[in-house]
Image (cartoon, grey):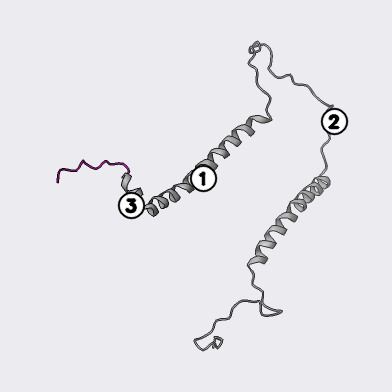
């Protein structure tokens, strides 16, 4: 009964009417992509705003003459030449190591304790292996 027009490479308008579930699934597939894109865009915008929020604006001024320094150096106190002796240096090193070892030991100990199975004190030690009849398997 006549020739049909060529199919367009784009979306078929009759497929949405014939297969509403397929159209719905296609929309559901695009939703996570949109949410990830929107979350990424929001994160980038927040990082941009926070990176310049606590920084004073820089006003462009003329460069200082070559004879002057851009930064004026000034001493805040008198140098006494005090150098701690070896006993005091050892004590400061011990305090530093002890102060950093406490959180490391707590975190590492908790991590190791998590992976060591309980062995005594009740039936919470895990599931025993059994054969088809339910008898426990023991090494002979």
Q: CA distance from mark 1 to mark 3?
A: 28 Å
Query: Tag 2: Cα neighbours inside 10 Å, few (<14), some, or many (≥20)?
Result: few
Q: Please state the extent of the stretch shown in magenta in the rendering.
A: 1-11
Q: Quadrant of the C terminus?
A: bottom right
Callout 2 touching callout 1 (CB < 8 Å): no
SS category of the residue bearing label 2: loop
Q: Disc 2 and disc 1: Cα gap in Å? A: 62 Å
Residue 127: x percent and y percent? 59, 78
Please give the residue where the numbered disc 2 appears in the rendered image.
80
Residue shown at 38% from the left, 53% from the top: 22
Q: Earlier in the sequence, mark 1 or mark 3?
A: 3
Instruction: Indicate the secondary structure of the residue bearing disc 1.
Output: helix
Q: Is residue 8 magenta?
A: yes
Discs 1, 3 touching: Cβ within 8 Å: no
Res. 84 image quadrant: top right
SS for tag 3? helix
Which residue is nearer to you in this view: 3 or 42? Answer: 3
Residue nearer the viewer, 78 or 131 = 131
Residue at the image point whose x is 54% and y is 84% from the top:
130
- 10 Å neighbourhood of mark 3: few (<14), some, or many (≥20)? few
Q: Which mark is residue 35?
A: 1
Q: Position of residue 20 (x, y in %)?
A: 38, 52
Q: Position of residue 104 (x, y in %)?
A: 70, 55
- Asked whether the beta carbons under mark 3 and mark 2 sit within 8 Å of each other, the answer is no
User: What residue sits right under mark 3 in the picture?
Assistant: 18
């Amino acid at each position: 009964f006549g020739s049909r027009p060529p199919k367009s490479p784009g979306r078929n308008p009759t497929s949405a009417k014939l297969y509403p579930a397929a159209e719905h699934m296609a929309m559901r597939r695009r939703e996570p992509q949109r949410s990830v894109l929107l979350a990424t865009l929001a994160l980038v915008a927040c990082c941009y705003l926070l990176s310049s929020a606590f920084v004073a604006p820089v006003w462009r001024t003329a460069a200082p003459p070559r004879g002057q320094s851009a930064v004026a150096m000034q001493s805040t106190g008198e140098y006494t030449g005090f150098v701690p002796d070896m006993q005091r240096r050892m004590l400061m090193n011990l305090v530093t190591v002890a102060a950093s070892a406490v959180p490391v030991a707590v975190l590492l100990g908790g991590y190791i304790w998590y992976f060591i199975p309980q062995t005594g004190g009740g039936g919470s030690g895990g599931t025993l292996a059994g054969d088809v009849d339910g008898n426990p398997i023991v090494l002979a």
